[in-house]
Structures are given as structure tokens and as C-alpha cells.
């Protein structure tokens, strides 16, 4: 396994000159291997977006270092390194610059001097990957939320990134839009081995990840597989996370005396357990 990104004792404050000011990110260390899907979860203000900005060089740490493809991110190599990263943000409406879907996806390619013929191929190719190739000449603002975010992902993909960072990219979408975007990202990951960092306060989304980083007050509170993170149970709620429906339901049923085996992260697991529980006895 090849390491693609790491944070080593990274600390960042938005007000570094104020001695006792709270740090947005404090002494955070973690590593990501190529092709992994990492979810970063945590309450509002826990430092997730600051982590995203530190990994894309929009901010630089006051202490510690960020490495991308084993190179320490600096002001000097920032542009080269950033060309390997795509970012998609929360609000689908704030990310469009083109009058049509294809213009929009072409924008960064054009800015980077990609030749016309290759540009057309990349625009069509990346829109196809997110299943939006039938919308080339549509106006972005007429699309649904899920379609908009898929176009935003296509814009990032057109640059052939190694790492895709999604900062709450599904949080403003309806369930169908969310599903579309997540399926798109899963398919891409399987197909082109993209490394995905998805920042979310949605634990159901975090369940899709290989590995979860749990942030609390700027610090890494825990990390592990989704199952290991869900095993933290009540701590998740105490630290401001919203449990998936199946977990809340499991708890409520257990309180009512229904004997269920452990915790259920998905509705399917819960349903299967209910078939064999003492529910009907
Ligand atoms: P999250 O994305 O988890 O909600 P953020 O990384 O946005 O958290 O914020 C972490 C902390 O840094 C919060 O206390 C927030 O108020 C503060 N913060 C975020 N952005 C700024 C900024 N531009 N200037 C000053 N403080 C900020
Ligand atoms: Mg944020």
C-alpha cells in the first residue's frame, strides 16, 4: 500500500497571535493510502473544513506538516501538488462558472492550457463517468442538486486528480441526490482507484468509508473502521453526531425489550435481526 496523504502533528489557529486562542486543528496525525476512502466526521466547528483547507494548501499549519504523495506541502510546490487534488464543496450553487454544463467542466482545463481536442475528450469523458453526458448543453442552475454535485465532481475529475475531497458535498441534497452522488463516487473509486476524503456529519455516509477519522474540538478523538467508530455508541451522540436511523431504531427497540444482537448500522442488518428476534414471541 502506498501512502498518498498524511498529517503529522498538524496544528492550526486562525488567530496565531492570540496566545490562548482555541486552535481550529490541534496536533492531528493520520495517514491515508492510495485508493482508500476516508470519512472525516465530527460536530460543527470540530475542524473538518480546516483539515480540508490544510490538505489542499489553502491554509498552512503553524506546527507539524502535511505530506501529499510523500512531499511536504509548501508554498513552492503548492500548485503542482494541488493539480492532483479535486475538491467539491457543500453548496452546489456556488461552484458553477460556466453557462452550460460542458463549459463549466471545461473551465479549469482551459485555465490550465489543455489543448482543445484533449479538453473536449476530457469534458465528455468525465461527464460520462458521472452519468451527466446527456446534459452537455444544459444550464447548470436548472439541474437538480444531485446532478449539480455530479457536474462539480466531473469538473474535478477532468483534471485527473489522485485525491478527491468532498467537504459536506451531499449535505444540501435530498436523499435521492445524496444517493446519486455517493454511488458515483463509489463507482469512480472502484474504476479509477481514486482516493476519497469525504467530510460529513452524516454517519450513514461515513459507513461507506474504509476508515473514519472522528474529530472533536480540533483534535482527533478517535479513528478506525466504521464498525470500530460505531462501537463508541453514546459517545458519538454526546460529541454531536447524529446516529443513523437503524442505530436509533435498534436502541429504541432494545429499550422496549426486543432482544437484538448488538448494534445495527444499516436497516438491512436490523431487519434481518428482527426476523430472528423475540419480537413476535
Ligand atoms: P467544521 O468544518 O468541522 O464545522 P471548521 O474547520 O470550519 O469546522 O472550524 C473549526 C474552528 O475554526 C471553529 O471554531 C470555527 O469557528 C473556526 N473557524 C473556521 N473558519 C474560520 C475563519 N475563517 N476565521 C476564524 N475562525 C474560523
Ligand atoms: Mg465544515
Image (spheres, grey):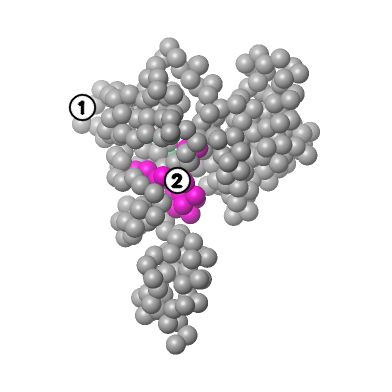
- Secondary structure beneath dot 2 equals loop
Are the residues tagged 1 and 2 within 8 Å (C-beta)?
no
Q: Earlier in the sequence, mark 1 or mark 2?
A: 1
- Which corner quadrant of the figure contains ligand 2? top left
Is 55 drawn above or below residue 43 in the view shown? above
Foreground pick, 102 / 271: 271
On whether ligand 1 comes within 8 Å of the CB at mark 2, the answer is no
Cα separation, mark 1 vs mark 2, equals 38 Å
Position of 95 compared to 262: left or right?
A: right
The quadrant of the image that shows the N terminus is: top left
Query: What is the crowding at mark 1: few (fewer than 14 residues within 10 Å), some, or many (at least 20)?
Result: few
Is 181 covered by the magenta stretch?
A: no
Q: Residue furthest bottom?
A: 281
Q: Residue at x 32, y 56 (%)?
A: 232
- Secondary structure beneath dot 1 equals loop
Q: Residue at x 28, y 30 (%)?
A: 9
Q: Which dot marks residue 83? A: none
Position of 216 compared to 40: left or right?
A: left
On whether ligand 1 comes within 8 Å of the CB at mark 1, the answer is no
Position of 20 compared to 7: left or right?
A: left
Is 11 drawn above or below residue 115 in the view shown? below
Q: Residue furthest left?
A: 20
Position of 65 compared to 199: left or right?
A: left
Is 199 covered by the magenta stretch?
A: yes
Q: Residue at x 37, y 80 (%)?
A: 257
Foreground pick, 99 / 84: 84
Horizontal and vertical percent position of residue 208:
49, 49
Q: Which dot marks residue 210? A: 2
Horizontal and vertical percent position of residue 86:
54, 29
**Residue 271 seen:** yes
Which region is colored magenta? Answer: 196-215
Q: Which dot marks residue 19? A: 1
Amino acid at each position: 500500500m502506498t501512502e498518498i496523504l498524511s498529517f503529522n502533528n498538524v496544528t492550526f489557529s486562525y488567530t496565531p497571535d492570540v496566545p490562548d486562542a482555541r486552535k481550529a486543528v490541534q496536533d492531528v496525525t493520520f495517514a491515508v493510502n492510495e485508493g482508500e476512502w476516508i470519512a472525516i466526521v465530527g460536530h460543527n466547528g470540530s475542524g473538518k473544513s480546516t483539515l480540508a483547507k490544510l490538505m489542499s494548501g489553502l491554509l498552512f499549519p503553524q506546527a507539524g506538516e502535511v505530506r501529499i504523495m510523500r512531499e511536504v506541502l509548501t508554498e513552492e510546490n503548492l500548485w503542482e501538488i494541488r493539480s492532483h487534488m479535486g475538491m467539491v464543496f457543500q453548496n452546489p450553487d456556488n461552484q458553477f462558472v460556466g453557462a452550460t454544463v460542458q463549459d463549466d467542466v471545461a473551465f479549469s482545463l482551459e485555465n490550465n492550457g489543455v489543448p482543445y481536442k484533449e479538453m473536449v475528450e476530457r469534458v465528455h469523458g468525465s461527464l460520462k463517468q458521472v452519468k451527466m453526458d446527456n446534459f452537455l448543453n444544459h444550464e447548470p442552475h436548472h439541474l437538480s442538486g444531485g446532478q449539480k454535485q455530479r457536474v462539480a465532481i466531473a469538473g474535478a475529475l477532468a483534471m485527473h486528480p489522485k485525491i478527491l475531497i468532498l467537504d459536506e458535498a451531499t449535505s444540501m441534497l435530498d436523499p435521492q441526490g445524496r444517493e446519486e452522488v455517493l454511488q458515483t463516487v463509489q463507482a469512480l473509486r472502484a474504476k479509477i482507484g481514486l482516493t476519497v476524503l469525504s467530510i460529513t456529519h452524516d454517519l450513514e455516509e461515513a459507513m461507506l468509508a474504509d476508515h473514519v477519522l472522528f474529530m472533536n474540538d480540533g483534535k482527533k478523538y478517535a479513528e478506525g473502521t466504521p464498525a470500530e467508530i460505531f462501537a463508541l455508541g453514546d459517545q458519538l451522540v454526546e460529541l454531536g453526531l447524529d446516529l443513523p436511523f437503524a442505530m436509533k431504531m435498534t436502541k429504541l427497540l432494545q429499550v422496549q425489550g426486543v432482544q437484538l444482537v448488538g448494534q445495527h448500522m444499516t436497516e438491512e442488518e436490523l431487519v434481518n435481526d428482527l426476523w430472528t428476534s423475540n419480537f413476535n414471541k
